[in-house]
Image: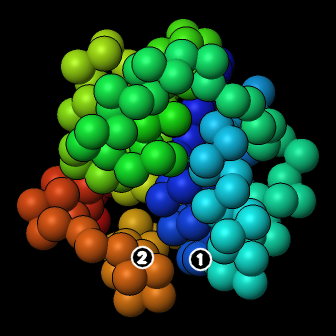
Amino acid sequence: MKTVSNSSVLISLSTIGRLFLLTKRFPDGIIVPEAVWTEVVEAGSGRPGSVEVSSAKWISVRESADRSLVNLLRTELDQGEAEAIALAHEVKANVVLLDERDARNAASKLGIRVLGTVGILVWGKKAGLIESLRTEMDLLENKAKFRLRQQLRARALSEVGE
């Protein structure tokens, strides 16, 4: 399964100690565009995710060749989001990992399946890899400073029976 990720999912899961969920969910690994690698590993040196991502052998870096799509997406999205969506489109990824609403909408318009941090945690709970989705979402909000809409929180908890 081809999977491309933006920085937010990598940083959020690293911050709460759950980056390993990505290796379980996507055993073939994930691809990140150059801008995401730069944001998380280079510019993010010393911050959550930097060490975890740079040492993850299952994460590969690839540049998007479709610069016109990147530039078009940049009119409304940040560089990492634009590159992640363009790369996912280019490699015909099965899924792109994104959290921000505008980025998710843009990917969906291109026919790319989207999964975010909360979706990964829901999957982890269903797979028996995490004990409590509620605890993980609390960590996301408090430790990772993740903005979680109450509607999404309620829907996710309901989906796993919490």
Q: Identify the mark at residue 15; answer none if there is no mark.
A: 1
Image coords of residue 138 (percent x, y): 36, 82
Q: Secondary structure at mark 2?
A: helix
As drawn, 31 above or below 142: above
Q: Nearer the viewer, residue 77 or 115?
A: 77
Image coords of residue 150 (percent x, y): 12, 69
Binning the other alpha carbons within 10 Å of mark 1 as few (below 14), some (14 to 19) or many (20 upward) gives some
The structure residue drawn at horizontal position 47% and vertical position 47%, both measured from the top left corner, is 79
In the picture, measured across the screen, residue 32 lies left or right of residue 122, that is right
Q: Nearer the viewer, residue 107 or 12?
A: 107
The structure residue drawn at horizontal position 47% and vertical position 87%, both measured from the top left corner, is 143
Q: Identify the mark at residue 140; answer none if there is no mark.
A: 2
Say if residue 144 shows up in the picture: yes
Q: Nearer the viewer, residue 53 or 27?
A: 53
Binning the other alpha carbons within 10 Å of mark 2 as few (below 14), some (14 to 19) or many (20 upward) gives many
Image coords of residue 9 (percent x, y): 51, 56
**Corner quadrant of residue 10:** bottom right
Q: In the image, what residue type sits under mark 1?
A: Thr
Q: In the image, what residue type sits under mark 2?
A: Leu
Calculate the distance from the C-alpha at mark 1 to the C-alpha at mark 2: 8 Å
As drawn, 64 above or below 6: above
Q: Earlier in the sequence, mark 1 or mark 2?
A: 1
Residue extending furthest toward the bottom: 142
As drawn, 138 above or below 71: below
For the N terminus, the quadrant is top right
Q: Are marks 1 and 2 in contact (CB under 8 Å)?
A: yes
In the picture, measured across the screen, residue 66 lies left or right of residue 76, that is right
The structure residue drawn at horizontal position 27% and vertical position 24%, both measured from the top left corner, is 108
For the C terminus, the quadrant is bottom left
